[in-house]
Amino acid sequence: MSIPEPTWVVTAVLADDLLALNRAMSIVRRRNLPVTSLALGPAARAGQLRLTVVLTADQAAVVRMANQFRKMVDVIEVSLAREEECLGREHALVRVRVTPTTLAALLDVLALYQATVLEECPTDLIVEATGSGPFMTSLLRALESFEVLEVSRGGVLAVSRSPVPVAPAATRPGGSLSRPARAIPA
Amino acid sequence: MSELLSGAHIMCRLLEEQGVDLVFGYPGGAIMPFYHALPESPRIRHILVRHEQAAAHAADGYARSSGRPGVCVATSGPGATNLITGLATAQMDSSPVVAITGQVPRAMIGRDAFQETDVIGISLPITKYSVAIDDITELADKVRTAFHVATEGRPGPVLIDVPKDVQNQKLEWPDPATGRELLRRPALERGLPGNLEAAVRLIAEARRPLLMVGHGVILANAYDAVLGLAEKTGMPVITTLLGISGFPERHPLHLGLPGMHGEVHVNRAIQHADVIVGIGLRFDDRVTGNTAGFAPQAKIIHIDLDPSEIGKNIPVAVALVGDARELALQLTAAVGRRECEAWREEIRGFMRPRHEQYRGDMAPEAILAAIREGSGPGTTVVSDVGQHQMWVAKLYGYQEPNSHISSGGLGTMGFAVPAAMGVHFARPDRPVWAISGDGGFQMNMQEIATMVQEAIPVKMAIFNNGYLGMVRQWQQFFHGRRYSATPIWSPDYLKLAEAYGIAGYRVDHAAQLDGAIASAMPEPGPALVEFLIEQEANVFPMIPPGGSLSEPIEAAPAGAFTP
Ligand SMILES: Cc1ncc(C[n+]2csc(CCOP(=O)(O)OP(=O)(O)O)c2C)c(N)n1
């Protein structure tokens, strides 16, 4: 039996230009790495983009990829961490069908997932939710019975955790400090 | 207010500012403003090639032999796409080629305009950097950045795409001081295994150490430093295809070429080594064979400028990231003096005599010896790709730094003739030979016209075996002798020479060798010498593709093709 490959988060800060993004992505494409999530947005400094790539691969392959990133012109910073060394969150907007008979049940589910209703229409709600990848999957599964009309997921955003570990979430009263506070079926 | 200049004028002045005095190119619609401005920069000599691919190879040859950026220019669309093979060749072999392409006017981009090609998109994966100029105000910064990128650290090709209307925009000469804050790069990977002391310890404790020299030694001008390291430690020296002429071959410590066509004793030395110091090489698969079986007992000390090379192909015990020359000097200062006599004796025991027979005594070594003796010291040999490339690599006996130039990583047929033109301009007073097979020669032989027009005295050798020899060899060994699409007809090269008005010689017996070379050398312009060689000669030994260095093929398989 082989050990499952770890999941990695590679974060790159790039010059704010589509060519830089194109170059970064062609490294990933050429190596045909199994990317599970990609997120792109402005970085902390103006004129820079932050690209977050989540992938599952052996260490040698991701280190090679990170090194290729580092070599690229217009890459300002690269960091590579295992998934557990980062705090990652996904963001999603979901449009879900609602009828007078399903409204109460739907609101219950949304409350359980701490999802926010952004807009109400007579036939559907637009809902916003944030959480880890499995959390989002679980939410979407829970919403299936109400008929999901449209989903827009943003991809994993991550920041590295402080290298000095705080008390592990499981030993703290009330569990993890991060949302969602309540236990969600995995 | 100072005078307004067109984008094209600014481009020419920027080339002058970067010290460029030579460009290889070919005009066309989208680059015409540049060509209009060029005559106003008389310091820049323009060489009109006969195919843009040749412009890129010539710029590459110039860059490799001078260490300075080589510049090529083409129009949009087909002109730009014709450069691509040359850029990919330069990328694989870390050569600082700067390509400038015209582009359709900005308003036409994205509308499939006449001769519009997304050359930035096409070139991205095969250049170190490619950049489009979106406005004349960006021109100076981006051109300066591109030249900087091409030459800094590990060199590589860059492409600058300039829309025609940007070439016609007007601006004052941009002050050099305004150049954009040059590229910020992330710090090199830290926490690489080991350090100088660890390397010193490994070398001191080694019983069978080897030094492997790659292209990085030539790029870093580390010739003397590496020689010093070898002599202080007595480590035998192996030179990869692009490392050839990074170490004097008549030196007693020089062993030869490793890998697919490496000598048996060289590959056996690798398989027996307990420490390998690799400088400026990437442990390419043509060098390692099957990596699982490569140097099974050796701890690898890898010295390279490019941290992404460390551990890329094979695991290393110690990595030293930085300039090859500096690190070789530091290592030499830190290691104790030692010898490797017993180990060298052991390697001598691995050597095998060669016993191939060649038609009319036209052994490759006889041809190459005649060229070497006939052209004397200071000669640069540029090889093409195929069987002759391996012979040129293994049998010439290079004594001077960077005197052997070849397309290693991409293995581009058609490279030799145009690249040799570039070498001539870097070394105008020294002989340059372009040695090709009859296949590769016919890929870029149109450049004879360029040589005639520009009085470029490159001497061309054709190893004519009537086949695409290296592919034929693989067919003989691995495809049951089915010579599918490898017999190749050639024109009468003497008449070809005559048509171009240059001297041509044909040699089909060893006795004529010296005479032909002696006649070709003093020709003031280009000259061509055709060598009729054994048609089915093979390059031995050979590691079969995917095989380990321990399994060389040393004789052709018996029997003909049976379907
Ligand atoms: C542009 C290009 N096309 C195809 C090949 C594949 N190839 C490698 S060696 C070779 C044969 C070369 O024949 P020739 O130029 O006659 O040289 P020889 O091997 O006979 O010395 C071929 C076709 C290549 N390396 N480059």
Image (tube, coloured by chain):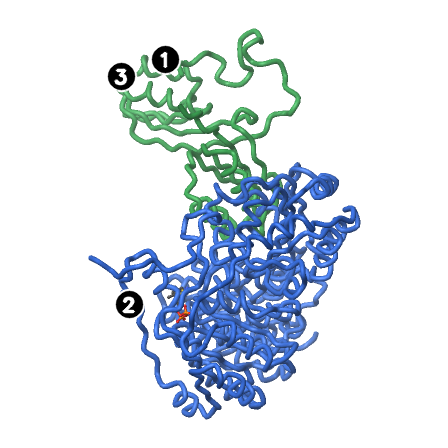
Q: Residues within 10 Å of mark 1 (few under 14, many from 20)?
A: few
| Disc 1 versus disc 2: nearer the observer | 2
Q: Chain of mark 2?
A: B
Q: Chain of mark 3?
A: A
Numbered label attached to residue B485: 2
Q: Residue at x 57, y 40 (%)?
A: B297
| Quadrant containing the N terminus of chain B in the rendered view | bottom right
Q: Residues within 10 Å of mark 2 (few under 14, many from 20)?
A: few
Judging by the rendered image, the residue that carries numbered circle 1 is A108
Looking at the image, residue B371 lies above or below residue B389: below
| Disc 1 versus disc 3: nearer the observer | 1
Q: Residue at x 54, y 84 (%)?
A: B514
Q: Under 8 Å from ligand 1: the CB of mark 3?
A: no
Looking at the image, residue A98 lies above or below residue B477: above
Tell me where residue A140 appears, x and y as whole percent: 35, 23
- In the image, is B249 to the left or to the right of A149? right
Q: Colour of chain B?
A: blue
Question: What is the CA distance from the residue labelled 1 to the residue labelled 3?
Answer: 14 Å
Q: Colour of chain A?
A: green
Q: Residue at x 48, y 84 (%)?
A: B528
Which image quarter: residue B180? Answer: bottom right
Question: What is the CA distance from the residue labelled 1 to the residue labelled 2?
Answer: 72 Å
Q: Amino acid at mark 2?
A: Ala
- Say what secondary structure mark 2 lies in: loop
Q: Same chain for the residues at labels 1 and 2, yes or no? A: no
Answer yes or no: is residue B104 visible: no
Q: Nearer the viewer, residue B61 or A41?
A: B61
Judging by the rendered image, the residue that carries numbered circle 3 is A100
Q: Same chain for the residues at labels 1 and 3, yes or no? A: yes
Q: Amino acid at mark 1?
A: Asp
Q: Under 8 Å from ligand 1: the CB of mark 1?
A: no
